Image: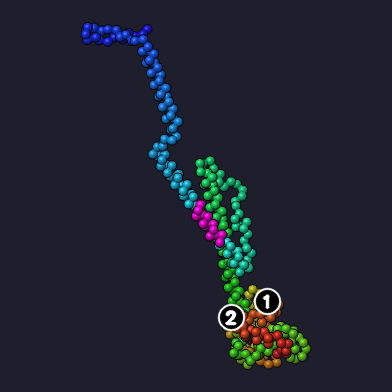
């Protein structure tokens, strides 16, 4: 049952029943319905735009994310620059350093090999920027591995350089008798006439004519292997082990001033020219042995001869004359 509403009439000083005009209720109903529709529409718009409405914290996080993406881009650019520098170092390493020290070059596959097996980046998947993070992580890992490979290569080169320095100091490279002390270079390496039998015989060293007592010097760093006169034909002689397969021999000495096991350096005095053993006149018989085989000492005089002096020595050494031992 509908409620009856009254209003107070001040003219008659009495209450009168409120009478609604026809259609008013309908109007009120439609206005209410329209209000609800508009309210629902507004609520729908607000709901649909909630993702685009940012709170202060969301704005801060968004700025932080943008900054992170920028930092990743800068990091990638720096890695590209580092990769360029490293590639130049790798090129010099293979083309210069390893060639000079006779080491095999490191292959491109070995330098830039990836990481096989399990997925190393699984924990980085599933995020909005996973591709960027994974790509950057891979670049860092590959670059790190290349740096490790190059570091090991440089360590190897440093070791080879140290050995090379020892080798260069050890190889017999000077004449055992100073030029000003020489009378002449009497006989070279090769077939010569034996001074005693006059038969053609292979001469395994070089003979340097000099007065008795002329100083004889070590031609390279090493350790005295022998200093005695217990070898047939050589008389008093010294043998120096230079390492790396090299041995030098100094024969027919008047006397020696070193002993077995003593370390010597290139240019150290080891004895004096004489004519002991199977010798026809005072001279130094000098030999170089490489890996157990006698080699021509002429090929090792690049330490103290000018090009003109070497050319003259080469000319004299090539003459097939008579040796002095």
Residue hosting label 1 = 290
85 in magenta: yes
- Is residue 218 positioned above or below 244 on the image? below
The residue nearer to you, when weighing 110 against 88, is 88
Across and down, in percent, residue 93 comes to: 58, 64
- Residue shown at the point (63%, 84%) measured from the top left: 310
| Coordinates of residue 301 in the picture (x, y in percent) | 63, 81
Residue ranking furthest to the front: 22
Q: Are marks 1 and 2 in contact (CB under 8 Å)?
A: no
Q: Position of residue 130 (x, y in %)?
A: 52, 44
In the image, is 77 to the left or to the right of 113? left
Q: Nearer the viewer, residue 176 or 50?
A: 50
Q: Which residue is mark 2?
A: 266
* Dominant SS in magenta: helix
User: How far across and how far down the image is residue 219, in percent?
Assistant: 61, 81
Q: What's the magenta region?
A: 76-88
Is 128 positioned to the left or the right of 198 in the image?
left
Q: Mark 2, residues whose alpha carbon is within 10 Å: few (<14), some, or many (≥20)?
A: some
- 102 in relation to 211, above or below: above
Q: Is residue 26 toward the left or the right of residue 316 in the image?
A: left
Identify which residue is drawn at 61% across, 76% down: 170
Tell me the SS state at disc 2: loop
- The foreground one among 144 and 99 is 99
> Can residue 22 be seen in this snapshot?
yes
How far, Cα to Cα, is label 1 from label 2? Answer: 17 Å
- Residue 228 colored in magenta in the image: no
Find residue 169 and report its image quarter: bottom right
Q: Secondary structure at mark 1?
A: strand
Give the quarter of the figure containing the N terminus: top left
Sequence-wise, the earlier of marks 1 and 2 is: 2
| Label 1 Cα neighbours within 10 Å, binned few <14 / some 14-19 / many ≥20 | some
């Amino acid at each position: 049952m509908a409620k009856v509403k009254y209003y107070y009439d001040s003219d008659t000083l009495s209450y009168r029943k409120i009478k609604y005009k026809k259609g008013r209720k309908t109007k009120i109903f439609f206005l209410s319905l329209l209000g609800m529709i508009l309210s629902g529409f507004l609520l729908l718009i607000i709901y649909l735009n909630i993702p685009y409405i940012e709170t202060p914290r969301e704005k801060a996080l968004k700025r932080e994310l943008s900054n992170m993406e920028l930092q990743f881009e800068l990091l990638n650019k720096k890695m590209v620059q580092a990769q360029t520098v490293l590639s130049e170092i790798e090129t010099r390493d293979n083309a210069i350093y390893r060639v000079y020290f006779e080491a095999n070059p490191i292959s491109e596959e070995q330098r830039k090999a990836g990481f096989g097996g399990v997925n190393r980046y699984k924990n980085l998947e599933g995020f909005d920027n996973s591709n960027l993070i994974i790509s950057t992580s891979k670049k860092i890992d590959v670059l790190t591995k290349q740096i490790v490979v190059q570091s090991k290569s440089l360590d190897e080169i440093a070791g080879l350089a140290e050995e090379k320095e020892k080798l260069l100091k050890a190889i017999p490279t000077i004449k055992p008798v100073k030029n000003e002390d020489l009378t002449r270079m009497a006989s070279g390496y090769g077939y010569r006439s034996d001074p005693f039998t006059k038969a053609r015989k292979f001469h395994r060293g070089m003979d340097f004519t000099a007065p008795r007592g002329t100083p004889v010097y070590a031609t390279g760093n090493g350790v005295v292997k022998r200093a005695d006169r217990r070898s047939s034909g050589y008389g008093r002689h010294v043998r120096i082990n230079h390492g790396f397969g090299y041995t030098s021999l100094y024969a027919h000495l008047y006397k020696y001033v070193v002993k077995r096991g003593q370390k010597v350096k290139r240019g150290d005095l080891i004895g004096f020219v004489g004519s002991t053993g199977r010798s026809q006149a005072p001279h130094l018989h000098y030999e170089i042995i490489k890996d157990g085989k006698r080699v021509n000492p002429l090929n090792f005089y690049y330490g103290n001869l000018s090009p003109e002096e070497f050319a003259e020595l080469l000319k004299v050494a090539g003459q097939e004359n008579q040796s002095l031992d």
